[in-house]
Image (cartoon, rainbow, N blue to C red):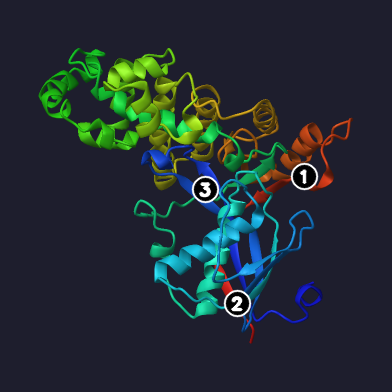
Amino acid sequence: MFNSKFGSIPKFYVRAPGRVNIIGEHIDYCGYSVLPMAVEQDVLIAVEPVKTYALQLANTNPLYPDFSTSANNIQIDKTKPLWHNYFLCGLKGIQEHFGLSNLTGMNCLVDGNIPPSSGLSSSSALVCCAGLVTLTVLGRNLSKAKLIEFSPLRATDVKLPSGAVFVIANSCVEMNKAATSHFNIRVMECRLAAKIPFLCGGLQTGCWNSGVCHLCILFGELLAKYKSLQWDKVLRLEEVQAKLGISLEEMLLVTEDALHPEPYNPEEICRCLGISLEELRTQILSPNTQDVLIFKLYQRAKHVYSEAARVLQFKKICEEAPENMVQLLGELMNQSHMSCRDMYECSCPELDQLVDICRKFGAQGSRLTGAGWGGCTVSIVPADKLPSFLANVHKAYYQRSDGSLAPEKQSLFATKPGGGALVFLEA
């Protein structure tokens, strides 16, 4: 196909895997660790550098049209989530990192088997691939830590159970984060939830229960210091925990005391922060959240702190490897889905149905993975139950009498930890 598109043959290939988040949903941008796993499905790009400045992109999937531009005039339309923009992001990121003004052109053919809009990071894999393509064409090197640094990155290996497999099931409901406001609203709710506890008398010195009476003294000492905290500088819920120096379990109690379950409206938030509605809109809210009328700060904070605790519990169980390890990990995954569904409200009826079906037919645990509102579930299944599990889930969810699910969308597969991004050079 490369030859038919460009009349030549590729000089090298780059691949980058998709990934599944086993546990830890919507907490990375709040400052907390997650537990992702590279999957075997990937994006593959065949590349031929050319002597002109022309950048030509093609895709093996006919749904994604060809695109061409000048390598020295990269323009990314942020209002349109077109497939080639993800490639351009990877290219432009490398260009800006090295401060390059003149880039060589290239012909690229993109292929892949990661289901799009499924929560398996197909777009991230394409961005990563494009970055590696650009590095290879330029003959440059970039350390892995620098390439994926974001917090900064800190990674710890976790040994997963050998007696179980992880199964990905696509709900066949596509959710495009770039084209909707759901994701942006949740991010903003988390940011606001991080600011409110330090204001309106949100942190009190009263006891929540006898088990945490020592916090009364702690808060008594901290209130004077943290009342002068610059709330406008606090962006993440993890920062609140770090300032207080307490555990995630204790932060759940703080949330109970500092935030109320009823949704906050913009006027109440303004009273707490001591600002005007105009200041709230222009200085805090993002353009796509300025018209939101309610903010569920309590629910979002409860999810974040409890989910962050589940990630640490998951890691601890993997390290200790008790006999009932798979059962314990499954219970944490089930709790995660309940929190995503009820507290973060990022599930959908199809995902809930698929999770129930997976549990019914042998999964010890099942949960949505990725941003939610569609996409995939991930389930932990005992290895000896895998064949019957796959057959029963396929029949119960995908073989519908009305034929509403197209065969190419019926994505159900077991996976194991996959390799990282690679460059394949012609011998």
Task: Quote the CA–CA distance across marks 3 and 1.
Answer: 29 Å
What residue is rendered at 84% in x and 34% in y?
404
Where is mark 2, residue-wise? Answer: 53
Task: Give the numbered dot on residue 161.
Answer: 3
Farthest-out residue, front: 278
348 vs 263, nearest the viewer: 263
Task: Give the numbered dot on residue 318.
Answer: none
Crowdedness of circle 3 by 10 Å Cα count: few (<14), some, many (20+)?
A: some
Q: Amino acid at mark 1?
A: Lys
Where is mark 1, residue-wise? Answer: 409
Q: Is residue 61 above or below residue 385?
A: below
> Between tags 3 and 1, which lies in front?
1
What residue is rendered at 26% in x and 14% in y?
208
36 vs 89, nearest the viewer: 89
First along the sequence among labels 1 and 2: 2
Q: Amino acid at mark 3?
A: Pro
